[in-house]
């Protein structure tokens, strides 16, 4: 399998639909995970080295950015090691192994992961695609030892074509998330997104 284009590669003169989609997804992911990095750093205090699992990593580029910023050899106070991503896409594990060898790529369903598997479990812009999002978030909490952090569109109306539901304060509070940051994101159609964190 050949290496796929990254967000930093120059597009061809006539890019394919898949190349354009990868560019758009990668650039969006870098923004979302930069937001996640700042959010986690402001909520998790002290010098820490914590294991991290990202659920629904898609292309892996955002997680690779998070790994770099919070690398155990970096100057950052909050470090993540080891770092893994899981996705239902059967190609995800192979893509991560080829492009981001410092990250463990897993293909599968979080419902099959053991309890208390990772210190920090994050999920960026995935739950709005899941009809039974409450059950999904309960699984995120089950596999986390210390923290669960979620990013998603906030109070979206009308819903985007591929989104199943609106996520709002009531959704999070019902599941034990009381630290919720709502803000405008330049990468979400100039719309409103949120970050929420729960201590286990």
Image (cartoon, rainbow, N blue to C red):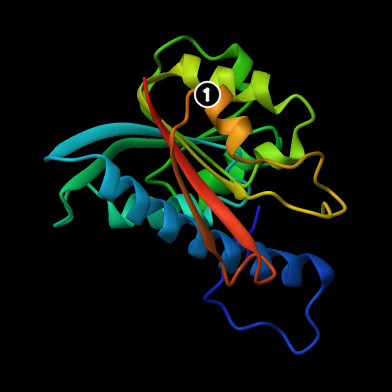
Farthest residue in the bottom direction? 13
Q: Give the quadrant of the C terminus.
A: top left
Q: Hey, which quadrant is residue 20 in on the image?
A: bottom right
Please name the residue shown 63% across and 31% down the image.
Answer: 171
Please name the residue shown 18% across and 54% down the image.
Answer: 76
Residue 174 in picture, x, y percent from top left: 58, 23
Question: Dot 1 corresponds to which residue?
Answer: 140
Please name the residue shown 36% across and 51% down the image.
Answer: 39
* SS at circle 1: helix
**Badge 1 density bin: few <14, some 14–19, many ≥20, Cα 10 Å:** many
Q: Nearer the viewer, residue 62 or 160?
A: 160
Q: Is residue 46 left or right of residue 123?
A: left
Q: Is residue 118 left or right of residue 94?
A: left
Farthest residue in the right direction? 161
Farthest residue in the top direction? 115
Q: Nearer the viewer, residue 122 or 181?
A: 181
């Amino acid at each position: 399998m050949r290496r796929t284009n990254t967000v930093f590669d120059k597009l061809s003169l006539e890019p394919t639909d898949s190349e354009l989609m990868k560019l758009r997804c990668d650039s969006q992911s870098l923004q979302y995970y930069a937001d996640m990095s700042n959010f986690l750093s402001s909520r998790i205090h002290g010098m820490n080295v914590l294991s991290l699992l990202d659920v629904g990593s898609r292309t892996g580029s955002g997680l690779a950015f998070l790994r770099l910023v919070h690398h155990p050899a970096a100057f950052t106070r909050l470090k993540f090691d080891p770092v893994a991503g899981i996705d239902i896409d059967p190609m995800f594990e192979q893509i991560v192994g080829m492009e981001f060898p410092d990250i463990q790529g897993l293909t599968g369903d979080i419902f099959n992961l053991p309890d208390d598997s990772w210190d920090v479990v994050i999920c960026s812009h995935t739950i709005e695609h899941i009809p039974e999002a409450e059950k999904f978030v309960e699984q995120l909490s089950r596999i986390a030892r210390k923290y669960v952090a979620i990013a998603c569109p906030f109070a979206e109306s009308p819903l985007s074509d591929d989104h199943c539901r609106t996520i709002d304060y009531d959704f999070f509070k019902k599941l034990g998330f009381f630290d919720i940051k709502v803000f405008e994101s330049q990468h979400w159609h100039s719309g409103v997104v949120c970050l929420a964190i729960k201590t286990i």
